[in-house]
Amino acid sequence: MAKLYFRYGAMNSGKSTALLQAAYNYEERGQHVLLAKPAIDSKGEAAIVSRLGVSRPVDFTIAPDEDVLAAFMTHREQVIRETGSDVACLLLDEVQFLGEQQIDDLLRIAIDEDVPVLAYGIRTDFQTIAFPGSRRLLEIAHSLEELKTICRCGRKAIFNARTVGGAFVFDGDQVAIDGVDVTYESLCGACYLEESGGVLNRGWRPKYDFSYRSGPDTDFS
Ligand SMILES: [Zn+2]
């Protein structure tokens, strides 16, 4: 049975480079792979772009709420038609931008379709909160592997701090693709706390309705 792998790391941990290397390793053995990424990620259009300068177009992009299993099957059938052999692996970049249902589809592809799925992405946003897709992967992936990168102080970086116009910001929307004004710096926990003034998850809001907790039976005050 194939497995779902979540390979996560802070920004600049070489995820896209590792993905392209993994794809190359399959193809070197004469096997066929499919590359995909969420459509929300505007960086590099419909390509996977490594900071080392290597880039490669994806086979398909995934729109919000799109059925990932159906999209995979369409492209898988095309590979079988054109090459006479099955897809050896599905590789996805920027998986933090996929929805929870779409991550569930990745598990179905691995288990039901018996095709390994390598999912690369960032664990948490600039406020140290897990992206919904990443949280789901942490819950259901067969294998978790951290890709490491170094903070400016030399420790392992685990957070992605956002800067706008060169200054750190700790409020704003969860998704802001880096570009002209917005950039990110991978920081260790100590440097993040130093920059944020000691605050973690400043943007946290309850996702669920906790009102059921009120009432005589659950009043712990
Ligand atoms: Zn540091």
Image (cartoon, rainbow, N blue to C red):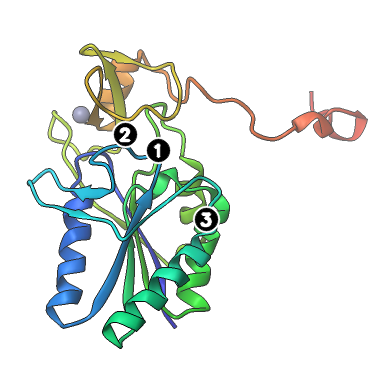
Report the quarter where the C terminus lies. Answer: top right
Check disc 2: other Cα within 10 Å, few if <14, some if 14-19, many if 20+.
Answer: many
Residue drawn where x is 39% and y is 50% of the image: 95
**In the image, residue 163 lies at what x, y percent?**
27, 18
Residue 7, x across and y down, in percent? 32, 56
SS label for mark 1 = loop
Would you name the residue on which mark 2 appears? 159
Do the residues under discs 2 and 1 have CB atoms within 8 angstroms? yes
Query: What SS does tag 3 mark?
Result: helix
Q: Which mark is residue 102?
A: 3
**Label 2, label 1: how far apart the Cα atoms are:** 7 Å
- Please say if 48 is above or below 213: below
Which residue has dot 1 on it?
Answer: 124
Q: Percent x, y for residue 150?
A: 16, 39
Please tell me in which quadrant of the rendered image residue 157 appears.
top left
The answer to whether the beta carbon of the residue marked 2 is less than 8 Å from any atom of ligand 1 is no
Looking at this rendering, what residue extends furthest in the bottom direction? 84
61 or 182: nearer the viewer: 61
For the residues marked 3 and 2, what is the alpha-carbon distance in whole angstroms? 24 Å
Q: Which of the two discs, 2 and 1, labels the residue nearer the N terminus?
A: 1
**Up/down of 82 relative to 197, above or below:** below
Q: Amino acid at mark 3?
A: Gln
Identify the residue shown where x is 32% and y is 73%: 89
Residue farthest left in this picture = 53
**Where's the N terminus, which quadrant?**
bottom left
